Image (spheres, rainbow, N blue to C red):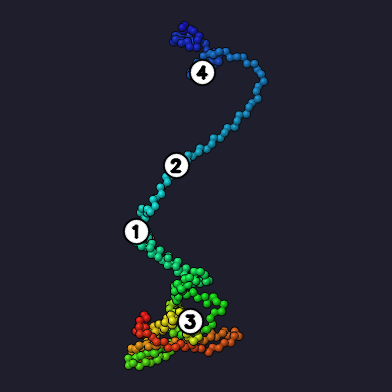
Amino acid sequence: MDAYDEGSNARHGPDAPRRPAPPAQRGAPADSAAPDVSPGPPEPEVHPGPEPEPVASPAPVASAAPVASPAPPEPVASPAPPGSWPPGEPRTGIAALSPRYQVGVALALAVVAIGVCVHIGMTFLHVAPANTVTRAHGEAVDDWIYPEFEQNWKLFAPNPLQQNISIQVRAGVRGPDGMTQTTGWYDLSAEDGRAIDGNLLPSHTQQNELRRAWDFFVATHDSENRPVGLRGSLSESYLRRIMVLRLDRDDAVRAATGGSGVIERVQVRSRTSNVPPPEWSREKVSTTPSYRELPWWRVPPDEARGGVR
């Protein structure tokens, strides 16, 4: 190909004269590094026409704030198997016991729970109206309740007791010489009253034993002191044993004989007096005490020698 060829891909040697630059490039600086642009095909002629209306360029959209990438999920600890204990923490309570003792504690709690349920059931049957269960098992319920757990509703009665009832006893004591002497009357109710007065925590025996024994006897005997029903002899034996124990505690035998002796018989009586009405009341009641004396009861030899302890 000729070196002076005007093609776009013609190569010019170093000694070849350069062609004059187009008019548009004559004013460019000499040191311009713009590449040579080869002429292309002629551009078509454009006739002047109406200028197009300017189109508003869309408003630049604000770039959204960078979204923080979500934190990686924390590892979830797998649940400990049942029955395991966290390491490093001391065991407390029942868990600190050995399996053998844990079984023993569980059995003890089960026995206590059964006893509480039985007691609550018996108490409910005792205070509930007559029903099929109490008709069939009334004796078992009474044996469980009496005399320690008897329910007494006199506190809420519309007409509470208005009498003071004291229980008194005397005894026939045989001394070492074979002679029998009769002691004076011991007011056992007054002794219980003195023990309760000023005592913040009086015992159940001081408060209820003597009073409930007398109520039990009166409920099972008629006005002639004859037993009514099968519980009459039981109430008589119960009251007699309480009298023997109380006389022995009060040293009645030593006081009567001056030394050792044996209780052969006892006699019980009640002293009943009405509570005087308040000063603002117009009620008039007699305050003269009345007595109810029971016959002498022989004391069996085993009770006299302390067999009732």
Q: Secondary structure at mark 4?
A: loop
Q: Kindly indicate the quadrant of the structure image that contains residue 146.
A: bottom left
Asked whether the beta carbons under mark 4 and mark 3 sit within 8 Å of each other, the answer is no
Which residue is label 2 attached to?
72
Amino acid carrying mark 4 in the image:
Pro
* First reached walking from the N terminus: tag 4 or tag 3: 4
* First reached walking from the N terminus: tag 1 or tag 3: 1
Which residue is label 4 attached to?
29
Residue 85 lies, with reference to residue 259, above or below; the image says above
Marker count (numbered): 4
Q: Disc 3 and disc 2: Cα gap in Å?
A: 90 Å
| Residue ID at (41%, 87%) | 297
Q: Disc 1 and disc 3: Cα gap in Å?
A: 57 Å
Q: Kindly indicate the quadrant of the structure image that contains residue 250.
A: bottom left
* First reached walking from the N terminus: tag 4 or tag 1: 4
Amino acid carrying mark 1 in the image:
Pro
Which residue is label 1 attached to?
99
* Residue 124 in view: no
Query: Are there few (<14), some (14-19), or many (20+) residues within 10 Å of tag 3?
Result: some
